[in-house]
C-alpha cells in the first residue's frame, strides 16, 4: 500500500495523517503509528544506515500500482472462482492474475 505511494521510504517522514488516511485500508491507528516511527531521529538514522549498506529504499516497478485501461474487459470487475482448482491453492489465483496458459 505505502510502497506504491512514495518514491523513497524516507519521503514518509514528511507526511501528515490525512495523507495516510487517503490510502485504502489505512486507518488512524496505522497512520499515527507510522508517523510516530518516522518522527524518531533514531529510526531515520537506522534507515539511512541500511540504505548506505545496500538496502533499497526506493520504489521499484513491482511496488507501483498497476495501471489498467478503463476499457479493459475486466476493469472494475470481480472474478469469483468456484469449484476445485486442481493446479493451485486457494490464494494463488489472486497472486497470478496476469498469467496466461499456453494453448
Image: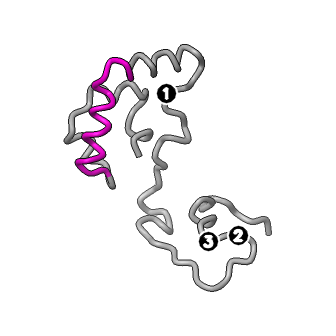
Decide whether residue 36 is among the magenta residues: yes
Q: Residue at x 49, y 68 (%)?
A: 74
Decide which of 37, 86 is in the foreground and name it.
Answer: 37
Query: In the picture shown, does residue 7 fall above or below 61?
Result: above
Count residues near mark 3 (Cα–Cα under 10 Å), then give few for <14, some for 14-19, many for 20+: few
Q: Quadrant of residue 14?
A: top left
Q: Residue 30, relative to residue 11: is it above or below? A: below
Quadrant of the image occupied by residue 20 = top left
**Residue 3 horizontal side relative to residue 36, left or right:** right
Lower position in the chain sequence, tag 1 or tag 2: 1
Residue picked out by circle 2: 88
Q: Is residue 41 left or right of residue 99?
A: left
Q: Secondary structure at mark 2?
A: loop
CB under 8 Å between discs 3 and 2: no
Q: CA distance from mark 3 to mark 1?
A: 32 Å
Q: Are marks 3 and 1 in contact (CB under 8 Å)?
A: no
Circle 3: element type:
loop
Q: Position of residue 42 (x, y in %)?
A: 37, 19
Foreground residue among 73 and 15: 15
Magenta range is 26-43
Dot 3 corresponds to which residue?
A: 90
Q: How many marks?
A: 3
- The secondary structure type at the circle numbered 1 is loop
Farthest residue in the right direction?
A: 103
The residue labelled by disc 1 is 58
The Cα atoms of the two marked residues, 3 and 2, are separated by: 7 Å
Estimate the x, y position of residue 22 in percent, counting from the top left: 25, 47
**Considering only vertical position in the picture, is 61 above or below 53?**
below
Amino acid at each position: 500500500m505505502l510502497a506504491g505511494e512514495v518514491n523513497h521510504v524516507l519521503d514518509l517522514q514528511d507526511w501528515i495523517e490525512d495523507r495516510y488516511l487517503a490510502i485504502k485500508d489505512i486507518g488512524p491507528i496505522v497512520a499515527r503509528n507510522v508517523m510516530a516511527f518516522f518522527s524518531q531521529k533514531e529510526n531515520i538514522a537506522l534507515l539511512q544506515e541500511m540504505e548506505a549498506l545496500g538496502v533499497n529504499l526506493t520504489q521499484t516497478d513491482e511496488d507501483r500500482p498497476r495501471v489498467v485501461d478503463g476499457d479493459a474487459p475486466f476493469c472494475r470487475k470481480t472474478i469469483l472462482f468456484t469449484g476445485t482448482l486442481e493446479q493451485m491453492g486457494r490464494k494463488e489465483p489472486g497472486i497470478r492474475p496476469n498469467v496466461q496458459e499456453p494453448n
